[in-house]
Image (cartoon, rainbow, N blue to C red):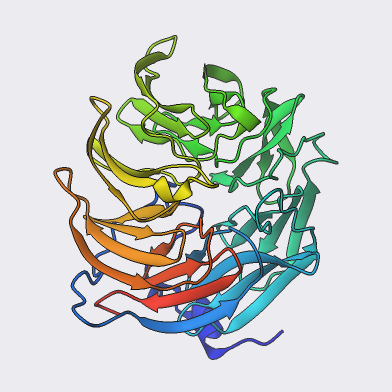
Amino acid sequence: MRFSLSLLLLFLFPALFGRDWPNFGGPFRNQFSDETGLKINWGNDEPLRIWKLQVGLGYSSVIEVDGLAYTQGNKDGRNTLYCVEATTGEIIWKHSYPCEKAPKFFDGGSRATPTIQDGILYLCSHEGDFYALDAKSGSIHWTKNLVDDFNGKRPMWGYSGSPLVVGENIIFETGSPMGSLVCLEKRKGKLIWKAGVSEAGYASPILNKSNEIYIFNEFGLVVHDFKTGKIKKKYQHKTRYGINAAQPLIYEDKIFISSAYGKGAALIDFSKRVPNVIWESESFSCQMASLVSKGRYSFGIHGQAGARSKQSKLFCLDLETGKEKWSEKGFGLGTVILVRDHLVILSDSGEICLAQANPDKFIEKARFQVLSGKNNWTPPTYVNGRMYCRSSKGDWVCLQMGTGN
């Protein structure tokens, strides 16, 4: 294992390295960055590609903490987690372990995005291997297996959720009928509680302002008490094949959920003892891409993989009324994040589009081809002026898109 000067600086001067993106969807799991400096007006220029790596098949998104960036991919029957120096792409360390690519009608490969907090990286494979690793060196703190240790049941397309760390605890799905959601002590892996009977979905658990855990699983949306795991409320939202994958979106004291396969979307009021549906619609079926929101307006991708994926559309939705404000085709089954007032849309064919987060009309500002191939369903990551994009085939590209870096 080779340590660079930049890694030494991480230990000596951690404040030199700015913001972090520590888990799937960013610091608050809502696909949002409040970072300033994203360059919007490019003219005839294109972003500088700082570096590029090949990391293997998969859909694990990219995280960055303390100047180090991470993702995992699959090749030759193994998953490999890469830790690289963010500004150069230099590989600092790798953690590799046996894991089949498990294609299931698509390319297959890694699914889940790692999570970092307090120097520990938490990593789950789609087969259920779970690791707690030192984020700077890659050394193993502890390991579990979701199937063997918790009687877990793998969903059809494999475990995909990013572990949730809250304080001294870590929370993730197992899909076990004897405790589908588990909470462990994060430093030693000791079981604190397990609760629920639903099979696992493909979304990641999130925490609301009342310290309740939302989990969008095979049953629908389930609300757990953080301290005990007790189920407080639930709302059934079943789909064909049990696929609930897009992240729930918290809006005031309500929550928006959406799925494909003819199910559609719903805005639910959870402030009452019994959850109340405010509106439902089949017009906003988000198969995998999570929505982003700016006030009462949200932006997402409606569509489904397969023969009709080219009919997918980017849309703007008024959360209060459930009405579409506008829509725009041409991104396939892409993904979207929000950087302050602008959408960063990555099409499934690997094209980045910058557009205003405008509720009145679609206003495009720039467009670049950054990845090749198809089925590029992994959302980009923007942190410290760098835009990370990762293809389903494993091309990991780092672009300079901030004006102040």
Residue at 46% in and 57% down: 379
Q: In terms of image quadrants, where is residue 342?
A: bottom left
In the picture, which quadrant includes the N terminus? bottom right
Q: Find residue 301 and report its horizontal and vertical position in percent.
A: 38, 45
Question: In front here: 310 or 8?
Answer: 310
Residue at 47% in and 71% down: 371
Farthest bottom residue? Answer: 5
In the picture, which quadrant includes the C terminus? bottom left
Question: In front here: 300 or 254?
Answer: 300
Position of residue 30 relative to residue 256, above or below, is below
Horizontal side, residue 81 vs residue 348: left or right = right
Q: Find residue 192 and report its horizontal and vertical position in percent.
A: 70, 34
Q: Find residue 166 and report its horizontal and vertical position in percent.
A: 53, 43
- Is residue 144 in sight in this rendering? yes
Farthest top residue? Answer: 273
Farthest right residue? Answer: 148
Farthest front residue? Answer: 307
Position of residue 307 relative to residue 226, above or below, is below
Question: In front here: 337 or 151?
Answer: 337
Residue at 39% in and 51% down: 31
Q: Find residue 254 and report its horizontal and vertical position in percent.
A: 35, 25
Q: In terms of image quadrants, where is residue 152?
A: top right
* Count of labels in the image: 0
Question: In front here: 232 or 374?
Answer: 374
Horizontal side, residue 370 vs residue 63: left or right = left
Residue at 18% in and 78% down: 43
Horizontal side, residue 170 vs residue 5: left or right = right
- Is residue 28 in sight in this rendering? no
